[in-house]
Image (spheres, helix red, strand yellow):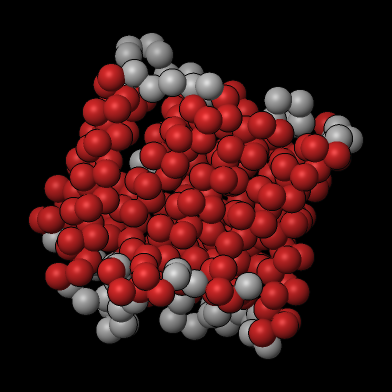
Amino acid sequence: MRAVIEPPPSARAVLPRGAALMVVAAVGFAVMNACAKEASLRLPFIEIAFARSLVGAVALALYARARGASLAIHNRRLMALRAGSGVAAMALTFYALSVSPLGEASALLNLTPLFVALLGAVFLGERPSPAIVVALCLGMAGALLVFQPRPGALSRGGVAAICASATAAVSMVSLRRLGDTESSEAVVTHFLAAGAVVTLVATAPVFVTPTARELSLLVVAGLSATVAQVTMTRAYAADVAARVGGMNYLQIVAGLALGAAVFGERPGALAWAGIAAILAAGAALVWSARRAPAQDGTSL
């Protein structure tokens, strides 16, 4: 499993550590979103959140045990902040996916880097460089072109997606501090365990027995999200929060591709312009990351 979580050698030669890890995470989260969207056609969103948490917690605990990785938590207060904000973001994410088109939800869910850049500057003292600021603004403009908001058009799913982005940013910024004292496996396992307990209580009154196909979707969603969560945790521990967070924009492109392939959602001309802006933003972030060494002095 180690080989799955770490980026391939070819990526290590091109991208700094944090950026390469976030590419893997972006793909993993896009797969999770597509599986969750499909499962939500019949299953309650909170049940999907429970399955994602349970599958991930069990898989990661077994993985950590096989590797001999410590699951001890030293900074309990910060871990509580990470778990609480992460569980809230997860529930809001699955709700947004259940009521919104996949491409639209992916775009709004990936406004997180803007919140990350702001919080990173305020709480971590990481002032983003002009190149990062330009790239983040370009990515936001691309997300807006994909979503194409109009007065009065913001749905409940859209509001949930924006709130998920904000709470996810709180969770992600906390990873920069947790990475100094905790292992990636410990952080993600405790977050998923907390999520499993909270969503189990909420799922009980509305539980729907999944079919074999829906069960397979839930398992794939949980496993792909777990791989993505661990790589994201390592990425935020390895580099500047704003720069790493900007790579999240790749999820929009992956989400649109899966939305077209699986759900027949076809982006229009403005959406394609947004995709181009997002790709340009990602390229600018990679360029910035290559010019400035990763915080831990390593690169891939």
Question: What residue is drawn where x is 69% and y is 50%?
Answer: 220
Q: Nearer the viewer, residue 127 or 28?
A: 28
Question: What residue is drawn where x is 64% and y is 39%?
Answer: 35
Residue 241 is situated, as x and y percent measured from the top left of the image, at 32, 63
Q: Is residue 246 above or below residue 109?
A: below
In this image, 257 relative to 239: left or right? right
Number of on-image labels: 0
Q: Is residue 244 visible?
A: yes
Residue 165 is situated, as x and y percent measured from the top left of the image, at 44, 43
Question: What residue is drawn where x is 29% and y is 27%?
Answer: 272
Q: Is residue 166 visible?
A: no
Q: Is residue 171 above or below residue 92?
A: below
Residue 38 is situated, as x and y percent measured from the top left of the image, at 66, 31
In this image, 98 relative to 102: left or right? right
Q: Farthest residue to the top: give it.
A: 152
In this image, 198 relative to 293: left or right? right
